[in-house]
Amino acid sequence: MTNDGTTAGAAPKADGSATGSGDIARSLELLWGTGERPSRGPKPGLSLDRIVTAAVAVADAEGLAAVSMRRLSTELGTGTMSLYRYVPGKAELLDLMLDRVQGEPFAARPDEPPADWRAAIDGMARGHLDNLRRHPWLLKINQARTVLGPSALRGLELALTGLRGMGLRDPELIGVIIAVNSFVEGLARTRADEAEAVAQTGLSEEAFWDNQRPYLERAMLSGAYPVMATMAEDTFSSEFDHFEFGLQRLIAGFDALVREREAERAASRT
């Protein structure tokens, strides 16, 4: 036995917080609709779609830890064992939940690409931020090994279609998506952590910083932090839009790269 209670050489038990940690083959069958459908049972109104919808609703309201087969059976008014006829367990259910919510930013969008790649990046960033606000549990899961379903692939297809006009190499286009998503997730995680800290401690953001104010003021007067001491009073104001600032700087940076590549291609032709 190891320190975490698992048998030496055995894979640790999935805790339902990492995608692709269950039966990958079964997740793919469920995502792409190629698996066998359950035979008609005592609860004919039950379906895989209803189970995933209920799981997402519970996670949105109470966090991913609240999602369990027992909890879902209560929400759906059925026996726990009935759920296992549709999905093997929480790990596979998470794969389905992730694909469901990943498709939401694109569900209402037309198939036509945005006017240009700048608009595509802008829409991608804002859509991702809105999705993380609706489903903050997304920030708690490990998506390093995502089992790709139809919604995830459609989202990637639409994103790449909008970025094609940049004229970059394919790996660079993926790099653009990673850079934008990482920026958005970083800001969203900070905001979510702030809200969670308030909920856990009962101490507001204002009260938290008011407690530190006397110590910080003495530190600024000490002369040990000359740069910080001369910063404007509104430096850390919540009114400054870090999302808008960062997004526009990202787009400007990519624009400089696109122009550089265009100049290189023009030079090679001459």
Image: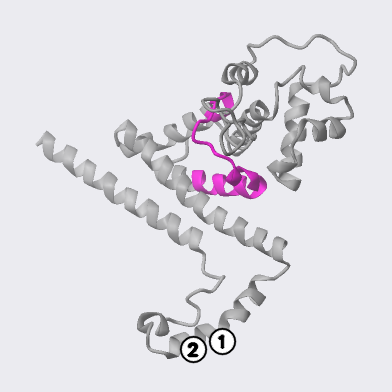
In-front residue for pair 155/41: 41
Could you tell me the amino acid type at mark 2? Answer: Arg
Q: Position of residue 34 (x, y in %)?
A: 63, 11
Q: Residue at x 52, y 69 (%)?
A: 240
Residue 53 appears in the figure: yes
42 part of magenta stretch: no
Label of residue 214 in the image: 1
| Numbered tag placed on residue 218 in the rendering | 2
Which residue occupies 58% across, 80% down?
212
On the image, the x and y values in percent for residue 213 come to: 57, 83
Task: Write the residue at 46% across / 85% down.
Answer: 219
Classify mark 2: helix, strand or loop.
helix
Q: Mark 2 packing: few (<14 Cα in 10 Å), some, or many (20+)?
A: few
Mark 1 neighbour class, 10 Å CA radius: few under 14, some 14 to 19, many 20 or more: few
Give x and y (percent) for residue 36: 70, 9
Q: Is residue 256 left or right of residue 28?
A: left
The residue sitting at 12% across, 40% down in the picture is 267
User: What secondary structure characterizes most of the magenta part?
Assistant: helix
Is 143 one of the magenta-colored residues? yes
Residue 64 in picture, x, y percent from top left: 69, 42
Would you say 17 lies left or right of 48 here? left
**What's the distance in space between the residues labelled 1 and 2, CA to CA?**
6 Å
Nearest the viewer among 2 and 180 is 2
- The magenta stretch spans which residues? 123-152
Q: Are marks 1 and 2 in contact (CB under 8 Å)?
A: yes
Task: Name the side, left or right, on which 93 lies relative to 254.
Answer: right
Q: Amino acid at mark 1?
A: Pro
Residue 196 lies, with reference to residue 267, above or below; the image says below
Up-down relation of residue 241 to residue 188 (above or below): below
Residue 116 visible, this angle = no
